Amino acid sequence: MTHGPLARPVVGVLSVHGAVAEHLDALRRVGADARPVGDVDGLGRVDGLVIPGGESTVLRLAAGDDLLAALRRRVAAGLPTFGTCAGLIALARDIDGGEEPITGVLDVAVNRNGYGRQVASCEAAVRYLPPFDTDGDGLGVFIRAPRITRVGADVDVVATWGDDPVAVRQGDVLATAYHPELTDDERLHRWIVDRARAYHRDNGNEDRGEGRRVGAQ
Ligand code: GLN
């Protein structure tokens, strides 16, 4: 028996800390069944995940070891994931200054607060590279943003600000130094929803999907 494509894939937003509501809204606008995820059980029920911005040290402590270990395992096993700002720091393999990585699944190095005091927070045009350039340039909202200081060989640059990569993708892991959820630019939220739909098609089955949805309410 075959099943049609899942219309509304389940996309979680890690909700232990940070700008959760804006991501839930953005995900719902582009067709996801979006829900907050705060524990290992909840993480097991999603087909895609957003790690929001906030403060990475708080995120690390608030999530705790069990959830971080489960997160590391699921993302490494292919769960489509999108991190913004502190979410980028949570995914990065290296954090400049020798801080322990949080999940370390994305082969980049980041410098926390790497734009310093002068541009601690600002809005700027970011240039999207193919295939993310279909809507032209975008608005980047940078809030004490991490600077990406190294991009691994398997990592594609998605967007730049001046000479700096500010959005990157490695397989189904996407991360931005800025906050697209604070603008009406929906292209990256559309991407995570599309990838979650594909993940569900390849790994899930429609019956389990329906059961999950009822059970999780
Ligand atoms: N500066 C924060 C950190 O180091 C990130 C800021 C943000 O997520 N807006 O975690």
Image (cartoon, grey):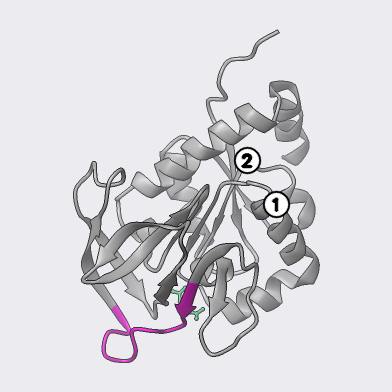
Q: Quadrant of residue 102?
A: bottom right
Image mark for residue 121: none
Q: Say whether residue 106 is left or right of residue 128.
A: right
The region drawn magenta spans 109-121
* Amino acid at pointer 2: Asp
| Residue at screen point 76% across, 58% down | 70
SS for callout 2: loop
Q: Say whether residue 45 is left or right of residue 194.
A: right
Marks 2 and 1, how far apart in space? 10 Å
Q: Nearer the viewer, residue 149 or 102?
A: 149
Per the image, is 113 magenta?
A: yes
Q: Residues within 10 Å of mark 1 (few under 14, many from 20)?
A: some
* Dominant SS type (magenta): loop
**Residue 210 seen in the current view:** yes
What percent of the width, then of the height, locates residue 211?
Answer: 76, 28
Please give the residue where the numbered disc 1 appears in the rendered image: 74
| Residue at screen point 63% across, 14% down | 3
SS for callout 1: helix
Camera-near label (2 vs 1) is 1
Relative to 161, say whether 37 is above or below. above
Relative to 1, say whether 81 is above or below. below
Please give the residue where the numbered disc 2 appears in the rendered image: 47
Q: Residues within 10 Å of mark 2 (few under 14, many from 20)?
A: many
Taking the view exactly as shown, the residue that stands out farthest to the top is: 1
What percent of the width, then of the height, locates residue 13?
Answer: 58, 54
